Amino acid sequence: MSKSPDSDRLILGIDLGTTNSLAALMTASGPQVIRAQDGSALIPSVVSFAADGSVLVGQEAKARALQDPENTIYSVKRLLGRSGEELQKESEGLAYTVTAGDRGLARVSIGESSYSPEEISARILGEVKRTASAALQREVRDVVVTVPAYFDDAQRQATKDAAELAGLQCLRIVNEPTAASLAYGIDGSKDGRVLVYDLGGGTFDVSILRIQDGVFRVLATAGNTQLGGDDFDRLLAERMLGSAKLASSALAASDPFALQTIRRSAEQLKVLLSETEIASISIDIGGEESVEFSIARQEFEDLIRPLIDETLDCCRRALADAELTIEDMDEVVLVGGSTRLPLVRKSLADLTGRAPNCEVDPDTAVAQGAAIQAGILAGGSADLLLLDVIPLSLGLETMGGVVSKLIMRNATIPASVTEEFSTQVDNQTAVDINIYQGEREKVEDCRKLAAFKLRGLPPLPAGLPRVEVTFLVDENGVLRVLARELRTGTEASIQVLPSFGLSREEVRDMVHDSIEQAIPDLRARALIEVQNKARAMVVGTRRALELSDLPGDESWSLRAAVDDLDRLLSDGVDEATLNGAVDKLSALSMQIADDMISSAVTKALREEA
Ligand code: ADP
Ligand code: MG
């Protein structure tokens, strides 16, 4: 038997976006989006050069965008392969310095140095590569990268060069609307026409595609390279700054840190408004102070309506260019994060006379399509972990280093379980939540996923604080653990992707080990449980002894039994011996309690008589 040469060839599909980039991989069950350890798929297409010489990419870089505008590069895709007049137009309004270098091509200035857009894009692709290699536990080399349909040869070549600089081999460049159509299941097996409406963070593109004999052809494109979600954030931020409370706050609109806070709050508020009719957010204005701002969806929609109307004009223009009408379209598909806006969906429904197709996640559709194309090139399917069931149990560490499982292996996704826990020590004001994955009983035999601390518990005797812990696995397989102290309401949470870096083989081995080790594991767990019980008895009985005024004899025998148990505990004796001593002590204290009650009863009777 011989293995077919391409059967485990790994080719990644990458959406190198203006605002966000991400990757996906074709698997036997379809394209699967690559997620980082914290469960996030989108990597902000932002690169920031810090003063100490370090270079940040993604989320960390985005956080610095308004604080260090000259050294934080965003939207670099606009500059790829551009020169002359186009470059001038595209670099207008960017907060960092762009100059025309060799052959009039763009250079980005950072302090004394300058970089080409390819070099900056390579940093973003490098981050995508690192995330994917870690998630798949394999070095990624071969990729398919998407570009806007209107990209010319120079822009396509610049994209390929960026991939090469990142140590990747770009096997194919695919048009974004084609990739989006593939993700929507339009696979070329049927002839037809598709309108792809792509509204992202900084750009809007509409494309009219014709599919004939399995070939996708772009008939027309239109759009606006300066229109997207960022504009909605900006409009909302302006409205927020104009509100009485914020205007009179200590927050200065000219302070870049403040501006960063407002912009981020505006984006969060916008995203909330896609789900609810009215949303509010509390904005930290420095110190301990915060200001509440709320807005209705209607009011937000009035702000952005002119921009959405402009996108509809672009759709009409593209149709006219293709000499087609909306009735000629067999499908209208939505991609780009901003198509989550209800106003976009409503407006498109009005334009087309039917509900637009938005079955595929608009953030990841293009990457998924790139993965489908990559899968075709690889000629096989890669073996990424399937996530419709939870492959390994999830739980947290409890006393004595055992794992208390909340979500069991093979539970279907999404899943959610809540249980109550308490403290082990008196006056404990913080608890560690250590999260583990695996089938074995003890923490050292399981895989540690994440840890966090819940602080601010009321100082109470051990066992009294009530800590509610919820494990929630969403449809993407991302686990969120939330811990809440019920008396004070203080809470803390963390998010992690349990399948990160885990292969099918490792899951199989972990399950296999748990079966093989089941009996020794159960014994170990039983021992720990007796130890926990013994420890509690030693502490509890000693405390009772201190408080009570037992007659000398009884107090002495009880004390001896407690010391015995304590010694056995520190000697680390086996379960049976320890259990014997526990039983002996509880029998003795029971006896003494009985005696005390009966003597109290006798005394009471005597007094009555
Ligand atoms: P690009 O293709 O330009 O890289 P994306 O397709 O990733 O961009 O879209 C990013 C934009 O989508 C951002 O402006 C973001 O705020 C916006 N967005 C993401 N989710 C939502 C949502 N639920 N409602 C409204 N806008 C959203
Ligand atoms: Mg995009």
Image (cartoon, rainbow, N blue to C red):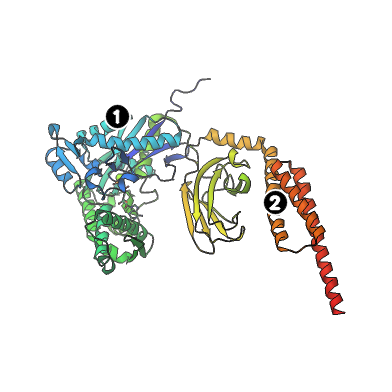
Instruction: Kindly identify the residue that appears in the image at 30 percent across and 38 percent down.
Output: 54
- Residue for badge 2: 533
In three-dimensional space, the C-alpha distance between marks 1 and 2, rounded to whole angstroms, equals 62 Å
- Residue for badge 1: 164
> Seen from this angle, which residue lies furthest front?
552
Instruction: Answer with left or right where residue 408 lies relative to residue 111.
Output: right
Q: Which mark is residue 268?
A: none
Instruction: Kindly identify the residue that appears in the image at 24 percent across and 41 percent down.
Output: 76
Q: Is residue 359 visible?
A: yes
Instruction: Kindly identify the residue that appears in the image at 83 percent across and 74 percent down.
Output: 604
Which is nearer the eye, 265 or 25?
265
Residue 550 place in picture, x, y as percent: 78, 62
Q: Amino acid at mark 2?
A: Lys
**Image height check: is 164 above or below 570?**
above
Number of marks in the rendered image: 2
Which is nearer the eye, 424 or 409?
424
Mark 2 surroundings within 10 Å by alpha-carbon count, few (fewer than 14), some (14 through 19), many (20 or more):
some
Instruction: Kindly identify the residue that appears in the image at 44 percent across and 42 percent down.
Output: 37
Instruction: Answer with left or right where residue 396 lies relative to residue 300.
Output: right
Mark 1 surroundings within 10 Å by alpha-carbon count, few (fewer than 14), some (14 through 19), many (20 or more):
some
Q: Is residue 304 visible?
A: no
Classify mark 1 as within 8 Å of ligand 1 or not, answering yes or no: no
Q: Amino acid at mark 1?
A: Glu
Classify mark 2 as within 8 Å of ligand 1 or not, answering yes or no: no
Residue 335 place in picture, x, y as percent: 33, 48
Quick one: SS at disc 1? helix
Quick one: SS at disc 2? helix
